[in-house]
Amino acid sequence: MTKTRNFSIINGYYFKQTTRIGASYAVGPKGEVNYFMANPSIPRDYSGELSELLPQLVETYGVKQVREYMSQCSAALDQVDKLNAVLSSSENNAPDFDRNKVMDGVMSATSAYYNFLMSVPEDMRRFLFLMGGVSPQEVDSLSQIEPDVGDAITQLAGIAPAIQAIRPKNYVMPIDPISNKLATLQELNQVVVSNRKKPPIKTSVSIDCPEHMKIDGNISLTTYDRSLINGVVSILESGNSSFTIGMLYQAMTGVKNPTVDENLVEELKTKLDTMRRLSITIDLTNEVKAHMIHKEFDAQVDQFSIEGYLLPLNKYSGTVNGKKSEMYQIIDTPPLYSYAKLKNQITTVPLDLLKAPLNNNSTTIPLKTYLLGRIEAMKNTKNSVFRDKILYKTIYSELGELTADKKRKARIRKYTCTILSYFVQQKYITSFREVKEGNAITHLIIDYAEPKN
């Protein structure tokens, strides 16, 4: 749903097929990469039990064809796994190691895998996707249900998780004016993107959702939602086109092989289901005409906009032996990320910075996101922000805790100091201190090393 036809007029870019289904990427003069979706599908739900689905597949397509689909899938995934292993091998530091060549191979193999998935029937594709999350016990159960394809199931289960092998090493954050104001957006918005010109430049942003969501009141967004979007973008930038809740949690917290609290799992799933149904339209015509977009156009632009689902995802779910398995497939570049890329307003920090010694929950996860965003803005010498000061009032507001009692606000300040102490330990900042005005602790002063030119 992103309007890719607009990007064809950008000078210095060429388009190629990417590893994601139906997508293309533009490689710029400096090697930068922008992903755009050609014809994304409308997100749909898939539910049911694999133990019921497998016999249906065998009955519909026959044992021979089902075995062939599984074998082809295993072969495609095996090739991706082998090339990823080469990339992570200790031998890749050898003088004659051609990293670009291997990376091209990874992209080609991954593209072949997704092209294969798109060539099989929908019910078979769903089965193949979900095989990446089954346990050895569940594999045995499926093999007993259809013993004629048991060996193919075992082979597929052994290699299926390979497509998820690329774990994010960086936390990617859009820091554009719209992303920064995500928690204040309503259905119709005029966001000020520059005060340097008179009158100020404004960009129109509209958010829409199905009628039943409007009735239920689920259209409001939060800083927590922004953390989740950053997690999906970080997964996308690491080379993945699909993810589980565990992978998303890792991308939002830095925790490896996490055991995610069941309540938090349900919370994340609810947020994903909301945001993949919310549509957003960003009309940046005024920014293009004011030459605020960091791209050159070889034609007059009368109108320029980006639109799509806030998180364009397909959801695959199934149940094996009473255990629910789910996977999300990224079918398009999130519009906010496309917008930030066009403005060159994206920052990347090591994922390890999210590992502050705190329980990860709906307060601490967005708090870390907010603090990282503010400090990154401070470190950017092109910004006009108050370069070393963070107001606690703003932190409370970002977390939806502006009217909280004194005890709750004291706890948030304690969380903040724990996170900042960890940033000092990681040498991300030099030091910090709290400042009192009267009897109240009102703000923080952040000290950091000036970025090298």
Image: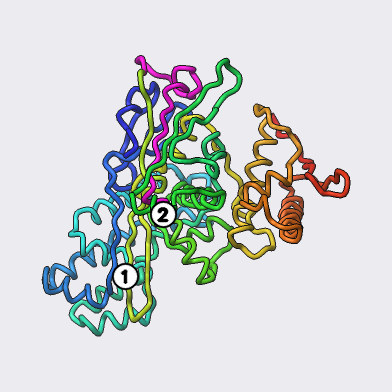
Asked if residue 181 lies left or right of residue 138, the reply is right
Which residue appears farthest toward the right when viewing the image?
A: 438
Between disc 1 and disc 2, the foreground one is: 2
SS category of the residue bearing label 2: helix
| Viewer can see residue 74 | no
- Is 286 included in the stretch rendered in magenta? yes
Q: Quadrant of residue 72?
A: bottom left
Where does the C terminus fall, quadrant-wise?
A: top right
Which is nearer the eye, 332 or 181? 181
**Residue type at numbered disc 2:** Thr
Q: Earlier in the sequence, mark 1 or mark 2?
A: 2
Q: Which residues are magenta?
A: 272-301
SS category of the residue bearing label 1: strand
Q: Is residue 166 above or below residue 447?
A: below
> Where residue 286 appears, x then y in whole percent?
45, 21
Asked if residue 182 lies left or right of residue 436, the reply is left
> Where residue 277 appears, x then y in whole percent?
36, 50
> Where residue 334 appears, x then y in whole percent?
41, 43
The residue pinned by badge 1 equals: 318
> Where residue 280 appears, x then y in whole percent?
40, 40
Which residue appears farthest toward the bottom when viewing the image?
A: 144
The crowding category of the residue bearing disc 2, from other C-alpha atoms within 10 Å (few below 14, some 14 to 19, many at least 20), is some
Which is nearer the eye, 244 or 104? 244
- Is 260 included in the stretch rendered in magenta? no
The residue pinned by badge 2 equals: 274
Which is nearer the eye, 208 or 170? 208
Which is nearer the eye, 353 or 397? 397
